[in-house]
Amino acid sequence: MLHNIAEGFAALFTLENILFLVLGTLVGLIIGALPGLTGNMAIALMVPITYTMSATTGLTFLTAIYCSSIFGGSISAILLGIPGTISSFATTLDGYPMAKQGKAGMALGISTISSVFGGLFSAIILMFLTTVLAEFALKFGPAEYFAVAILGLSCIASIGGKSITKGLLSGFIGLFFAIIGQDPQNGIKRFTFGSIDLLSGVTLVAALIGIFGIISVLKNAEKKTKENGPIPDVDHVWIGWKMCRKLLPTWLRGSIIGTIVGIIPGAGTNVATFLAYDTENKINRTKPKFGEGNPKGIAAPEAANNGVTGGSMVPLLALGVPGNATSALFLGALLLKGLTTGPVLFSEHADVAYSLFLAFFFANVIMAPLGLFILRYMKKILSVPEALLGGIILAFCVTGVFSISSSPFDVLTCIFFGILGYAFYKFDIPTAPLIVCLVLGSMAESNLRQALVANKNSYSFLYTHPVALIVLIISAVSFFVPIISKAVKSARKMRHPDEVKASDLAEETTEEMDDD
Amino acid sequence: MPKKDIGLGIVSIGFGAWVYYIATTLKKKAAFWPKIVAVGIIALGVIILIQGIIALVKANKAAAAAGKTAEVKTAVKQETVKYLKVAAVVGLLVVFYFLFQYVSYILATVLLVTGTSVILGYRNWKVLIPTAIVVAVLLYVAFSQVFHVHFPGAFY
């Protein structure tokens, strides 16, 4: 392992990679801070740019954007009371009151250091847990991989938002788009309608850019333009060692919660932030109260949301299963480079895998000085009108998509998925299940068919392979628990309509802000 | 909301049936997975349709009990304006799709940036026009010179 870490260091520490690490951090901070623009959108827009870069440089750039955009969301949450990303919703509860009390600098300082702490913690866990899991996954055959794909698909019940039925419908539509192209075993054309462009299936990156990029502009088109309120001045962002010592237990708890929730496919950043916030609220009896500007009310969710970043990459890198939309975007970037995730990545491209782990670590390290520095200029950045940004985002989307393979058809695919995403939004259908199923559909089908061939068309492999059986049982639990839990919650709500829990808040924010 | 769900249920059933029909024209092994997906879509469509009908019946009963009538003309007008804006942005994207292929990437991008910003409500022309030109030229230079992308238009 030490040898691999050394290889990762050698691959990561080039001038080009360091420059893209800094640039990615700045891009993520700015886009994350702007309300209405999400980290996923930033990653989707930048994936085509990474096409001409080396795998390490491209992934380093995207990692820096991912980590810093999650933190960036807290800036507008604190200064404007509007969370830049869904993961910063809980930060608004204490961050904005602190800013109104004239402590905007301190609130932003706490948010910066908490995010860095959570990010570093999860980067360490990512490295050690992923390598252990990937080594175990080396023994997997088609039956086990089919079970793993089903595990990934089972998370659509938990990322389905308000209505599980609509979440499942979104997932099945994603599976349909995954079918388009040639049959994985016999090369039979399916749903191509004579088009050569559809033979290789739907271009994943084009679909993702449509869903994350174009949809954000279409949503803005139907909103009434409104001016942001006055932005408070930011000074004295360094919080001091005494405050750091005071917040250390909160950071630890938040980071652990964030990392664990991140590893669970489909659990989502907002669940982690509200869980961390609620835990601190229950533990602490100090003043000021939570919701009135308590520093721990910022530290807990911020450590948790950056804790999710590393955790969410564990299933993708170790097993090849994206558990959320962000990891699906990373998978898209890896596929563009001709790399596959799972144990193969570690056996064939260990330098890329370990440089990615290290990129997660150093992206968070660099975020501290850059974050504290850029906070002074946030007032100007936040005053850029959303309407002006809309056109620029669209131009970036379509140009980026075209640049991947110089195919005008990909531009059309991107526009189509933008419109489809908007239709989903209007019908309250979540888009995250569509993305996860679009990615996992072919993996599930090809492994099922390979397993059937190996077992002489018998489904006995489902119970004769112990690992596959265990994973399928976990999938069933992961699928049915959210359904049962929702049923219990609605029954409880009917009995006690005034009782509000953290998980309810997390669910409500997901519904309000859609997929982040 | 219930009406939307009823519509969604019907569309899903229709879509699922279409997927199933196309799957029946494929060879047996290649059709297996698409058929599962089609059946899933149809089943979910039926559930959404039933849920929508139940919700509509409940809403109608509640409205009748409260003695309310549907006064939604203003809301409908506002919704139409919203959709027109969205349709205009989509229209600009389609115009871009043809313009950048057959005429000029820079011209298409300037039109896209300017048009979208105006639709979204930005009216400061002194900032908008130079921004659109700078963005279009920068993207053209970056993608054609740095990333070696060949744009197919007759002009730049």
Image: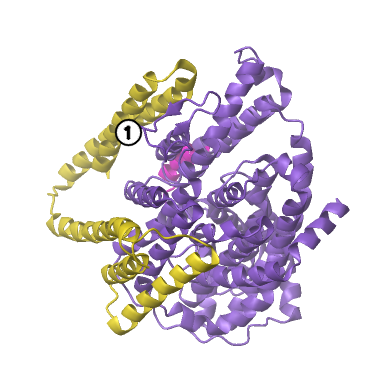
Chain colours: A purple, B yellow
Magenta extent: A485-498
* Residue placed furthest toward the front: B154
- The residue shown at (57%, 55%) is A269
Is residue A366 found left or right of A493 in the rendered image? Answer: right
Question: What amino acid is labelled 1 in the image?
Answer: Ser
Q: Position of residue A480 (x, y in %)?
A: 54, 33
Residue A226 versus residue A500 in the image, above or below: below
Prevailing secondary structure class for the magenta stretch in the rendered image: helix
Is residue A185 found left or right of A341 in the rendered image? Answer: left
A237 or A12, which is in the foreground?
A12
Label 1, secondary structure: give it.
helix
Q: Position of residue A409 (x, y in %)?
A: 39, 48
Residue A287 in the magenta stretch? The answer is no
Task: Write down the quadrant of residue A451 in the picture.
Answer: top right
* Residue placed furthest toward the right: A2
**In this view of the protein, can residue A70 be seen by the observer?**
yes
Number of numbered tags placed on the structure image:
1
Mark 1 belongs to chain: B
Residue B23 versus residue A202 in the image, above or below: above
- Residue annotated with mark 1: B12
- The residue shown at (39%, 60%) is A216
